């Protein structure tokens, strides 16, 4: 992040968006982590059931440390569930576990947005790490080409976050479809899972909006710098 006299008009909205999305996620997760699923299946069992039904018997379901650290790793094609989700039998555990299997299914069917996201990861990792420093140097030394380079690099990161949205929403859609089709959840329980997955998806929307605000700030500062020359 780059700080200056114009940051407040960009940072305040970003902070509001970030805090709101996190409060929404944690409150919804906490609420439905207290509601037990009637099936009594753990998150690990639900994930295994869906994967096996999709012909993904070789995809392992692993327990990982941390809170809400659940993810699908495309490098070794594994579904990784945090301890609460792995062993939990709540609606939150069932929903999150099913969501992560959605990513494994996307990988199996070569879902285009997921493939694109995977392809640009190296560029976005470099861009998100290097762009702030490059922009700071460019701004300090009044070098327009460095500021432009940083903006393009960070734009790639914003594009990555934009592509992430359909990937996450599609994974949730696949999760809800499988849970309903397998009869794991009742209609009322499905509503609870939908709320958990929607709250989780909002964090990705918030992350994108915050990055767009940061990129807008850089463009604003670069334009102002060029006009001062």
Image (tube, helix red, strand yellow):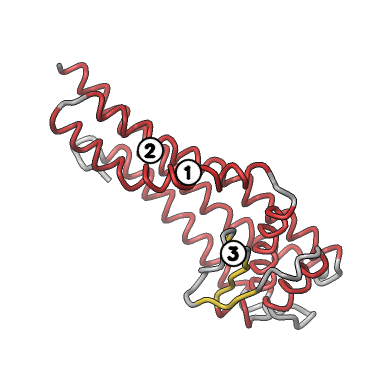
Q: Earlier in the sequence, mark 2 or mark 1?
A: 2
- 40 lies left or right of 162: right
Q: Please tell me whether mark 3 sits on a helix, a strand or a loop.
A: loop
Instruction: Give me the residue at 53% from left, 76% from top.
Output: 64
- How much space separates mark 2 and mark 3, taking CA atoms? 28 Å
Q: Nearer the viewer, residue 104 or 22?
A: 104
Nearer mark to the viewer, of 2 and 3: 3
Disc assigned to residue 154: 2
- How much space separates mark 1 and mark 3, taking CA atoms? 27 Å
Q: Earlier in the sequence, mark 2 or mark 3?
A: 3
- 18 lies left or right of 190: left
Above or below, comparing residue 220 to residue 57 in the picture = above
The residue labelled by disc 3 is 76
Q: Earlier in the sequence, mark 1 or mark 3?
A: 3
Q: Mark 3 Cα within 10 Å, few/some/many (few <14, many 20+)?
A: few
Instruction: Give me the residue at 78% from left, 80% from top.
Output: 38
Q: Quadrant of the C terminus?
A: top left
Above or below, comparing residue 152 to residue 115 in the picture = above
- 190 lies left or right of 148: right
Q: Nearer the viewer, residue 24 or 102?
A: 102
Residue 211 % position (x, y): 41, 42
The residue labelled by disc 1 is 208
Residue 213 % position (x, y): 38, 38
Q: Please tell me whether mark 1 sits on a helix, a strand or a loop.
A: helix
- How much space separates mark 2 and mark 1, taking CA atoms? 12 Å
Q: Are marks 2 and 1 in contact (CB under 8 Å)?
A: no
Above or below, comparing residue 11 to residue 34 in the picture = above
């Amino acid at each position: 992040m780059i700080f200056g006299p114009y940051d407040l008009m960009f940072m305040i909205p970003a902070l509001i968006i970030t805090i709101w999305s996190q409060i929404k996620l944690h409150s919804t997760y906490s609420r439905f982590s207290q509601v037990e699923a009637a099936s009594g299946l753990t998150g690990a069992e639900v994930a295994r059931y869906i994967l096996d039904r999709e012909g993904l018997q070789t995809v392992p379901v692993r327990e990982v440390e941390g809170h809400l650290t659940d993810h699908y790793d495309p490098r070794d094609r594994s579904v990784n569930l945090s301890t609460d989700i792995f062993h939990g039998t709540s609606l939150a555990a069932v929903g999150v576990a099913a969501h992560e299997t959605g990513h494994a299914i996307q990988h199996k069917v070569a879902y285009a947005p997921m493939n694109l996201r995977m392809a640009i990861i190296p560029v976005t990792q470099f861009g998100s790490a290097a762009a702030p420093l490059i922009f700071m140097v460019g701004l300090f030394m009044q070098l327009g080409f460095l500021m432009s380079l940083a903006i393009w690099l960070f734009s790639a990161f914003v594009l990555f976050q934009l592509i992430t949205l359909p990937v996450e929403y599609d994974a949730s859609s696949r999760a809800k479809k499988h849970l309903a089709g397998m009869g794991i959840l009742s209609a009322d329980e499905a509503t609870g899972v939908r709320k958990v997955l929607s709250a989780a998806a909002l964090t990705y929307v918030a992350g994108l909006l915050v990055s767009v605000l940061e990129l807008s700030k850089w463009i604003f500062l670069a334009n102002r710098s060029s006009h001062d020359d």
